[in-house]
Amino acid sequence: MSRETAHTTLPLERLRADFPLIHGQMNGKPLVFLDSAASSQKPEAVIRSIDTYYRTLNANVHRGVYRLSQEATAAYEEGRKEAAAFLNAASESEIILLRGATEGINLVASSFSRALIKPGDEILITAMEHHSNIVPWQLACEYAGAKLKVVPMTDDGELRMDEFERLLTEKVKMVAVVHVSNTLGTINPVKEIISRAHQMNIPVLVDGCQAAPHMEIDVQSLDADFYTFSGHKIFGPTGIGVLYGKESWLDRLPPYHGGGEMIATCSFERTTYAELPHKFEAGTPNIAGGVGLAAAIRYIRSIGFDAIHNHEQALLDYASVRLLEIPDLKIFGTAPEKASLISFLVDGLHPFDIGTLLDQQGIAVRTGHHCTQPIMERFSIPGTVRASFSVYNTLEDIDRLTDGLKKAITLLS
Amino acid sequence: MAEHINDIQDSIIGEFELFDEWLDKYQYIIDLGKELPLIEEDEKIDERLISGCQSRVWLKAEHVDSKLIFSADSDAIITKGIIALLIRVLSQQPPSDIINANLYFIDRIGLNDHLSPTRANGLLQMVNQMKRYGIAYTQD
């Protein structure tokens, strides 16, 4: 599978023209969108692909004998094909298309808890997980009588690898770890984590939601057992996500949801299940979502991760410098390897107040716990303000953010 | 004799009409928050927390001379301002008036439109809690 990158510098103005929404206004001011970590904006190519699907290709997939349904199926399966290439999966059967990464994690946790986890076993996660990579495992532990263990982190927001070593015992039946923290930006050493876990025959699930927009992922090189990401964070539509699982694991796991499409034969006496990947894809899928996902992945490939990375790191570096002009501003998440997002607080000011006044100036950031309440507890803070950057952001956006922040702070003093 | 609830609401509407820009309205809300009758630190117990807010809000009600006196605090400044507005309207009023109050000023100053769903929900919870105090203190 070829993985060329187009160029190492971003054609920024041309690229920004691809995204209709960023040129609009918010509260009467030009929009500065700094919340791509929550959901990215969509390029024309993705929007058009969905529009075209519904205008010219729409039909149910996988079952029809007529040409239109075959064309719809092919368009949908492009999503799977592109996802397999995106992750460098060994086979398309290892790509399960679902509603999102959260569903993928729930699938693995649920199926594991029903088949492969016994009372007294342990599941190991980390202190910087998103709720979507905590709660499914809590449910699994409750169901199976297992214990949840948590790898702590340093004040910089890095995993305590010494504690990881200590907690990785033969009782552990699964390690679930976030690749890139949505709150702290920390890039975790997942390859090392997987390698260590595999020495003890322990599988690893990686939550790649915040990695997929920013870096090349090679699941074979990582040797990940499971890897998930959501389409809407990589310029694709909402309601579509990818669970990659090694064929050997997916074959062992029992089905998650039952229904049409995932059966081979169905009778009241006995039902047999479909082959991979369909065994885990019950019901009519998000067909338009699969089409949009394919278009999004193709769009990313046309830019190339080298260019994306260079651009986003430049934004991150510039933002880090400009934000630190502000007295009493503290950045949360200061690992040496970070993705392009910054969580911060201004001493004495509630993030909600800052976010509200930035909103009034047309600047969209996220405030609160970012679905990582344990991180907030770890740092004893009510929440943070998070600015996250994508390919369509500019240095001027960061200037607007800094000026807007200074204005907000003045109003709040 | 305390001002009638609707007269207070009308005054507030008049004050907000002086501002064109929402940033200025927020500045005004922030300033109003500085006049919030504050609850004592040791009275900020969990039972007085209002749920449904992204920031923390404590609300206390006292029944004095057949009127309810409210005091409150929040760890967010804009929230303090919003609750100061509510207290300006509903405090020092008989419980029955509080229960029956139609708080039209919230819409008329555009606050409902401008608040995010989370904050609008928080505002609703604050109003509901104040009315609940009214119900609790109503004489049979």
Image (cartoon, coloured by chain):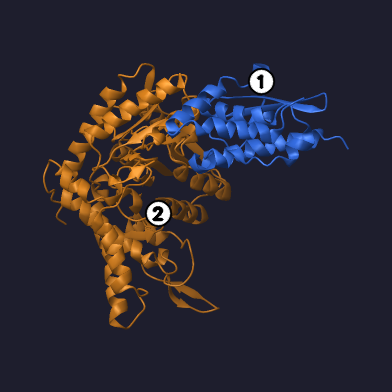
Kind of residue at badge 2:
Gly
Chain letter tied to blue: B
Q: Which residue bears the numbered disc 1?
A: B39
Q: Is residue B114 visible to us here?
A: yes
Q: Residue furthest right?
A: B140
Q: Chain of mark 1?
A: B
Residue A338: x and y in percent read 29, 32
Vertical placement of A298 versus A369: above or below? Answer: below
Q: Which residue bears the numbered disc 2?
A: A100
Kind of residue at badge 1:
Ile
Residue B126: x and y in percent read 64, 35
Q: Residue at (29%, 79%) from the top-left corner?
A: A68
* Spatial separation of the CA atoms under disc 2 and disc 1: 45 Å
Q: Nearer the viewer, residue A328 or A331?
A: A328
Q: Chain of mark 2?
A: A
Q: Which mark is residue A381?
A: none
Q: Nearer the viewer, residue A115 or A266?
A: A266
Q: For mark 2, give the secondary structure.
A: loop
Q: Residue at (86%, 34%) from the top-left corner?
A: B139
Across the whole image, how many numbered discs are drawn on residues?
2
Q: Nearer the viewer, residue A152 or A315?
A: A315
Q: Residue at (56%, 27%) from the top-left corner?
A: B81
